[in-house]
Structures are given as structure tokens and as C-alpha cells.
Image (cartoon, helix red, strand yellow):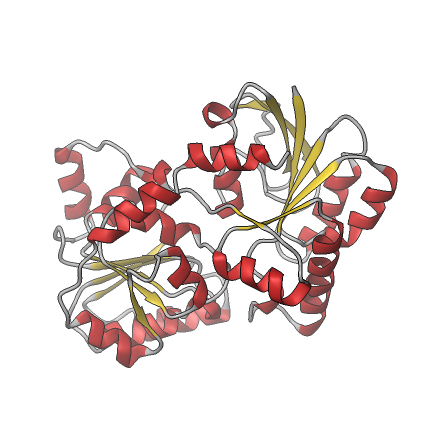
Amino acid sequence: MKQIAIVGCQGIPANYGGFESMVENIVGENASANVHYTVFCSGVDMPGRLHEYKGCTLKYINVKANGMLSVMYDIFCMMHTFRGYDTILVLGVSGCMFLPVLKLFSKNRLVVNIDGLEHKRAKWGWFARWILRSSEKLAVKCADVIIADNKGIQDYVTEVYGKPSQLIAYGGDHVIREIEQEKCDKILSDYGLTQRNYAVCVCRIEPENNCHISLKAFSQSDKPFVFIGNWNHSDYSKKLKKQYSNFPNIHLLDAIYDLDILYVIRSNASIYVHGHSAGGTNPSLVEAMFFGMPIVAYDCVYNRATTQEKAYYFKDDKSLLELLKRELDGSPMRSIAEQNYIWKKIAEQYEQTY
């Protein structure tokens, strides 16, 4: 049995972001009997400290997993992988400046998912961007296998580094649930929503997610818009919340962790709005595709690749507003998702890299 260590996520059970959901879904019932996973978790962010979960061994590092501390967190995780593992699966490049040391003292196979070009995100200052870009270079240089989760990322690795990478996307079928109609109706009523009569967006409120563009467009429309995010997270999010809270058709909801409520709100929308401009294959976009609704996405290579050019695309509030006036067809989205973004298939693709 192959022993696989996973580093670079906050930990499981998943309660944070895309990598955490990915780990939760490639282990457990989707994993073959030929592998055993050890997942390194943040003891600061995951106070429950389970020792086993879905057949995995969980180990804890007492460092916060997010922000700039993620660099130290990832390095400390890697320092615990010198012995006892066949393959190290590294998620993201935050701590990859340590990879030359790991390669020097360990014979472990290194598989690195380089994520979504983190150094290009607007939220980082120049020093953080330099660290992340340097880490990305070392990740590509040291990895035995480079994983790109999007064709745009794969092309970037080829063009910038002249190296091959394996394209393994993100899954989304975990969002499908069975909810009784009575409960569904109550949730919609509680939020003042009418089935198939509103647009929805779920994301972190960050500049590169173009939340300001979406909100400006809907402020000029009468279509109801449910926008779920972390509205008290930053100056950017607080400013937008103050600016758009009083529009009667715009509903700014704080993050929802009840999966039944989140499912009902997303599955009963008439349009999904996706403003992300960075990050490769974005989890929230893949998840929305399983609901089979029309998707209007920010026009960038990553979103076009994920939706196979079958969604609708905007660059600014004017082009988004024009899309809101049209009859949109979402029928291709579910079939694309079911062909490409099923976790069982993705778990098998990861195992082939070990």
C-alpha cells in the first residue's frame, strides 16, 4: 500500500476552501484500497483534532494555515514528511521554497498542484508576490509531477517554464443533495426568495473576484441578486456592503455554512454570476455547473476553459447588465460538469500520479 502525505491545506473535515474540499473528496470512499493518506492539518484552525477521518490519518501542526503564515505552515508540514511516505502531494506553492531541502534529504516522490498563480492576486504586496513567484519556480523545478487544475494554468506552465504538466480539474458533484420540498419552500420563504427568479453568487469578497462589477450591474437592474460572502472581512468588502446594502433587489448575505440552506439557494436560482479573474478552475464555478443553470462569468481564460466556452462572459458592468436582459440557456453546464468534474474520476487521476 502506498503511503501518501498531503500538505498545503488547512485540514479536514473541510470548512474553509477549495483545497480542503478537494482533499475531503479524493480520500475516503473515492480512494482505492492501494493508498493510505496522511493529511497534515493546522492545529490552530482545526481545534477538534480528530486523529482519523474517512480512513485518513490526521496530523497537526500548530501554525495558522492561511495568509502569509501559510508559508511557515507548509514548510513545517513538509519537515514531518522526510520518512515514512512514498509520495508527498503538495497543494499550492506557499512553502515550496523548502522543496530543494526536501529533495536533498528524502527520496519521496513529489507531486505539486501549483493552484491558480497566487502571485498574481491583487491582495498581496510586492514582497509576498516575490515569495510566491519564487516558490512557484522552485515547485516547477523540483516536482516529479506538476498538476494544473485548468487548461489556462497548464498552458502557462508550458509557456513560462517549458515543462509538461498533468491536467486534473476540481470536482463538484458533492453539492448534489436531496431536500424535501417542504423544507426547500421554507428556506426560500425565510430568505424572501422566489424559485427561478433571482441570480446568485457565492465567493470571497476580494478585488480579483470583481464583486464591484457584479454589484454595480445589479444596482442598475431590477433582478433580485443574492450575493453570499464574507462582507466584514476587509476594507474592500465593508465598502461594498455599505454602498449596496440599501438596494431593494440586492441581498448581501454573510457566509452560509449550513449545506442544506446553501444548496436550496443555489439550486433554485435562475442565473449564477461568477466574477473570479484568477485561480484556475474555481470550485464555486464547478459546483454551480452541476445545477444546470445559465452561468455568466468574468471573461478570462480560466473561466472559458472550465465552462468549455459554453457559458456567457462579461468584462464590465455594462456587458453584464446586457446579459441580464437576455434569455440565457444553461443546459450545457450540467453535461460538461458530469463529464469532467466528478470526484471519483478525479481521485483516480490523482492516484495515477503517485
Q: Residue at x 49, y 64 (%)?
A: 278
Percent position of residue 264, x then y: 23, 43
Residue 274 location (% of width, % of height) = 35, 62
Q: Is residue 247 above or below residue 257?
A: below
Task: Pick the quarter of the image with the C terminus.
Answer: top right
Residue 170: quarter of image:
top left
Is the N terminus in the top left, top right, bottom left or bottom right quadrant?
top right
Q: Position of residue 112 (x, y in %)?
A: 65, 46
Tally of numbered discs: 0
Residue 115 shown left or right of residue 79 in the figure: left
Q: Residue at x 17, y 47 (%)?
A: 188
Indicate whether 309 appears above or below 175: below
- 97 relative position to 49: left or right: right
**Residue 320 seen in the current view:** yes
Say which of 90 and 220 sits in front: 90
Q: Nearer the viewer, residue 157 or 221?
A: 157
Which residue ends up furthest to the right in the rendered image?
Answer: 105
